[in-house]
Amino acid sequence: MKEFTTYLLWTLGIGVVMYAGFLTHQFLQEKASIEGDPFLLWQFSIFFPIGIGMLLRLPRLLKEFQLNGAWRIHWAKLLGTGLPALYVIAAQLIAFAPISFVPPFFMEIVLLNEAHVTTMIHLIFGYVVVGSFYKSP
């Protein structure tokens, strides 16, 4: 019963955070349409899903704190999944930078934002970053 209550509270907590994120996104959307500057909305759209991904993996990380052993990093997971996701995130951030260099596949990544594919990539990135840390006996 304790485990059920923990999962239920965790689910409700994530639901509250997601609802607050939805309200914040709406506010930033209205602000961007009034002011004509979508930079804050763009940043929120990038970093909020990363935070949700981290929250989804946080219970397992908290269990790792209770274990004995040394902290390790699962490099294959971090580099194999996290690095390509980080490239997508960096490409989206570069969209607002005044630079003349355009990385490979830059425009394709920016256009993916309309399909919400990048939101899933951000979510996966947050999950993988937190999930890459573990304790080894």
Image: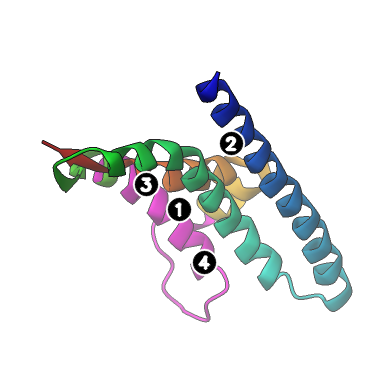
| Disc 3 versus disc 1: nearer the observer | 3
Q: Are marks 1 and 4 in contact (CB under 8 Å)?
A: no
Is residue 88 found left or right of 39 in the rendered image? left
Please name the residue shown 68% across and 70% down the image.
40
Direction left: furthest residue: 137
Identify residue for label 4.
Answer: 93
Q: Residues within 10 Å of mark 4 (few under 14, many from 20)?
A: some
Q: Are marks 3 and 1 in contact (CB under 8 Å)?
A: no
Is residue 76 found left or right of 59 in the rendered image? left
Is residue 115 found left or right of 87 in the rendered image? right
For this rendering, which residue is in front, 24 or 32?
24
Asked if 14 appears above or below 90 in the picture, the reply is: above
Q: Earlier in the sequence, mark 3 or mark 1?
A: 1
Q: Helix, strand or loop at disc 3?
A: helix
Identify residue for label 1.
Answer: 88
Q: Earlier in the sequence, mark 1 or mark 4?
A: 1
Is residue 107 located in the magenta-colored stretch of the structure?
A: yes
Amino acid found under the numbered disc labelled 1: Val
Q: Is residue 36 visible?
A: yes
